[in-house]
Amino acid sequence: MRAKTALPAVAMTAVSMVLTLAVVVMWLGAVMPWPVALIVGLGIDGGWLATLAYERRLAAQGDHSRTVTAVGWSFGLIAAGVLIAHALTAESSAGAWLAVAWLPIAAKALWLVHGMWERTALTPAALGAIRGIQQEARDEAAVARARLRAEAATEETRLTAVTQAGARVARVQARTAATLAAAWSTLATARTGEDTGRALTSVTTPVTPGVTPRWELPVWGPTEPVPALEAGPALTDAELDALVDRIRHSQTPALSYREMAARFRATGHAASEVRLRAAWKRVA
């Protein structure tokens, strides 16, 4: 893994040093002996290599020196400046030389990237632990999503069944109400009819003509609620939890949910199925 960042930096540094040395020898060789120009080029490259080696040594020790870094960047800038100056003064191929003038700066940037990679690199064991934690988190999230989808589907099925049952009850009540209304209307018509008195007179003795005993219609309509059937005050969550826990542990082993719910309603307490099941989950 280190080679992925170190090899490009080494290659870019070597190319930059060769280009710098060649440009210095060609540029200064015209005005001074070529050995002197070679020494100048080697001096620039040598200074760059020396500061780079010292930087790598400090990095291996976990240390850092801003002075050494500044000196290294100055050598890189000098090399880039030499290439740019040669490109600007060259009579031919100026564009080609200018195109490679950025190589010394690029080499320093690659070494900077390599140093950052070394400071943030992790061991294979740490990377394996991180992958395990991420996989465990993904598994837990998938299980949670599946559980939520299953609970939502169950609740939707239950609500559909309750709605359909309620619709059937409403239809039966509507038919019963229509039947009772028709019967009550028939009785009212018979009670107020002209022939009612004569019919009652013919079957009732002794009744004087013109006098017909009155009979009352059956009561059909709202009635007073029975006090014993009135709903009591709703239990709070804490009271419901305590009551469910007491019924559940009323015998050993503890009761199941169906047995607890049956005893709960048998004692006269009232709570919706959703609240009762939620209390059971909190307690059990």
Image (spheres, rainbow, N blue to C red):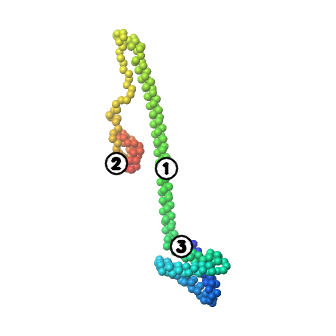
- Residue 69 spot, x, y in % from top left: 50, 79
The residue under the point 48% across, 80% down is 67
x 56%, y 73%: residue: 5
User: Which mark's residue is nearer the viewer, 1 or 3?
Assistant: 3
Residue holding disc 1: 149
Helix, strand, or loop for circle 3?
A: helix
Q: Which mark is residue 263?
A: none
Q: Which residue is mark 2?
A: 238
| Res 267 visible | no
Which tag, 1 or 2, sits closer to the chain's start? 1
- The amino acid sitting under disc 1 is Arg
Of tags 2 and 3, the one toward the viewer is 3
Residue 113 circle label = 3
Image quadrant assignment for residue 39:
bottom right
* Of the pair 243 and 150, the residue shown nearer to us: 150
State the quadrant of the N terminus. Answer: bottom right
Three-letter amino acid code of the residue under disc 3: Val
Specify whether residue 151 is in view: yes
Could you give the CA–CA distance between mark 1 and mark 3, rounded to whole angstroms? 46 Å
Compare marks 1 and 3 and give the one earlier in the sequence. 3
